[in-house]
Image (cartoon, rainbow, N blue to C red):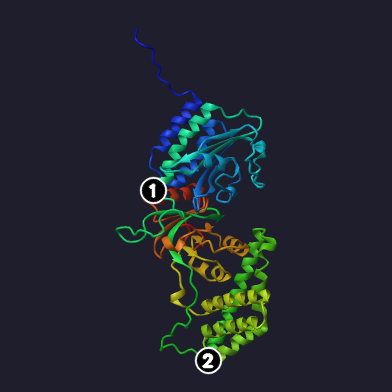
């Protein structure tokens, strides 16, 4: 008798989900697509409530949640563990799966207040393996009423983790342990790399890289055929003050709409400076003396800085001097066109910090995204990025080592990643993402995708 055979047709929910995942993972795709889809599919395969993907970054000892289903999206890019810390860190340290039916009772349990993971104590973490060590971890969690993860679950998740590992390697995720010297592509420009950061404003955007700029030290020369009197320049400066006041008023309204509360109180400092008659009077005085607007505002800023420096370690005056300098730069740019400080339209902004100058002036170029280095810190940065209202990430190490003006970049602030010179499929994926969100491209609307 012939041995009995059986074709396992569709109908076994778990087998169907596994085969569908294998078919999905076998296709070439942008890394962000995998991060979007893999956790969702994993929860279906294992009947889990939560699935998280952690990637090993930094000096090779920090695990960062880069994808998740089940928790608030704000956790992505923010939840971080050291290797060996928590159940997930222990799985990576020993390169072995770790499971438990009551996570809070596990000796290595690490609690995160904002996650609300007490609801999902049934826990399984498996390491994602690379060629020469760990690349991250896959974590599944179930509600307290669910059954624990059994051996078949552990074996299957360990095997599926290898597919995630292959995608991580292909994404060319750059960290401090990898190449420190950028390689230039044959056609010029940096080759494709993926840089991790921390999400601040969610969303995805594509554009040309443009470094944040400030006005040049010397005022732009005017054409000889244009006769401009000192009174004309005084009126131009007054117009710049009016524009700045209206812009700050709009920022206040937006801050209230976003319920930023005390976080946005620093904007009041700029309103007070603009309303200071001594400040405005000194600026007008210098302009009427024939110093030009840019030079006059620069001189006002230097005078305030010298005053602050005359007081020993007065942090309030030092901070106010920086605010005055920032506002003087903004007024100068609002009053006098300076091509050297202009940014291309609809760019990805990169820099070490974001200031009110950028929200007042740089935003006129309608940037579509922002990525700031590890030097960008503090509550002001987060508030200003939210007011700028474009997809944004911060803490991008090696940003200026890999990105240069004109490079095409993709900011994926949903996962906290920046892709320099993305592939065609990644570009198409961003466009599809935007289409699915129902966002139409509108010419001249700040923050829209182009």
Q: Nearer the viewer, residue 309 or 210?
A: 309
- How far apart marks 1 and 2 lie (CA) works out to 56 Å
Front-most of residues 60 and 147:
60
Q: Residues within 10 Å of mark 2 (few under 14, many from 20)?
A: some
Q: Report the side of 187 relative to 344 (left or right).
A: left
Q: Residue at x 53, y 33 (%)?
A: 44
Could one spot residue 383 in this view of the protein? yes
Residue at the extreme front of the image, as rendered: 94
Describe residue 343's horizontal placement relative to residue 276 as left or right: left
**Which residue does the numbered mark 1 point to in the structure image?**
425
Q: Quadrant of residue 102?
A: top right
Q: Which residue is mark 2?
A: 290
Residue drawn at 36 percent across, 56 percent down: 191
x and y percent of residue 71 in the render?
60, 43
Q: Is residue 162 above or below residue 301?
A: above
Mark 1 surroundings within 10 Å by alpha-carbon count, few (fewer than 14), some (14 through 19), many (20 or more): few
Q: Which quadrant of the rendered structure holds the C terminus?
A: bottom left
Residue 311 position by quadrant: bottom right
In the image, is 435 to the left or to the right of 287?
left
Question: In the visual, does 178 lie left or right of 354?
Answer: left
Residue at the left extreme of this rendering: 186
Q: Position of residue 208 (x, y in %)?
A: 42, 62
- Depth order, front residue of 147/251: 147
């Amino acid at each position: 008798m012939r041995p009995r055979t059986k074709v396992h047709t569709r109908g076994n929910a778990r087998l169907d989900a596994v085969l569908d995942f294998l078919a999905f993972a076998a296709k070439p795709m942008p890394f962000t697509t995998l991060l979007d889809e893999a956790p969702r599919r994993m929860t279906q395969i294992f009947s889990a409530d939560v699935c998280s993907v952690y990637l090993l970054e930094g000096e090779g000892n920090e695990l960062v949640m880069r994808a998740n289903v089940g928790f608030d999206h704000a956790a992505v890019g923010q939840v971080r563990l050291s290797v060996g810390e928590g159940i997930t860190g222990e799985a990576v340290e020993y390169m072995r799966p770790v499971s438990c039916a009551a996570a809070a009772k596990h000796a290595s349990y690490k609690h995160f207040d904002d996650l609300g993971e007490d609801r999902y104590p049934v826990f399984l973490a498996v390491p994602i393996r690379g060629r020469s060590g760990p690349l991250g971890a896959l974590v599944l969690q179930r509600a307290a009423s669910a059954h624990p993860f059994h051996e078949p679950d552990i074996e299957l998740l360990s095997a599926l983790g290898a597919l995630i590992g292959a995608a991580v390697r292909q994404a060319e995720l750059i960290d401090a342990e990898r190449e420190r010297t950028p390689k230039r592509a044959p056609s010029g420009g940096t080759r494709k790399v993926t840089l991790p950061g921390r999400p601040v404003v969610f969303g995805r955007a594509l554009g040309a890289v443009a470094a944040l700029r400030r006005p040049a030290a010397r005022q732009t020369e005017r054409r000889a055929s244009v006769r401009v009197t000192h009174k004309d320049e005084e009126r131009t400066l007054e117009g710049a003050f009016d524009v700045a006041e209206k812009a700050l008023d709009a920022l206040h309204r937006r801050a209230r709409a976003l319920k930023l509360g005390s976080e946005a109180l620093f904007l009041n400092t700029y309103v007070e400076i603009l309303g200071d008659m001594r400040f405005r009077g000194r600026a007008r005085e210098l302009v009427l003396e024939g110093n030009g607007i840019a030079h006059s505002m620069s001189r006002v800023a230097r005078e305030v800085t010298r005053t602050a420096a005359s007081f020993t370690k007065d942090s309030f005056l030092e901070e106010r001097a920086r605010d005055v300098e920032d506002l003087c730069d903004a007024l100068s740019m609002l009053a006098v066109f300076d091509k050297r400080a202009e940014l291309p339209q609809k760019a990805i902004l990169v820099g070490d910090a974001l200031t009110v100058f950028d929200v007042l002036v740089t935003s006129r170029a309608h940037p579509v995204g922002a990525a700031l280095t590890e030097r960008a810190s503090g509550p002001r940065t987060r508030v200003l990025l939210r007011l700028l209202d474009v997809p944004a990430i911060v803490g991008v190490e090696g940003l200026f080592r890999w990105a240069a003006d004109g490079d095409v970049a993709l900011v994926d602030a949903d996962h906290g990643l920046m892709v320099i010179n993305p592939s065609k499929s990644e570009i198409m994926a961003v466009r599809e993402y935007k289409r699915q969100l129902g966002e139409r491209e509108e010419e001249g609307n700040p923050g829209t995708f182009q």
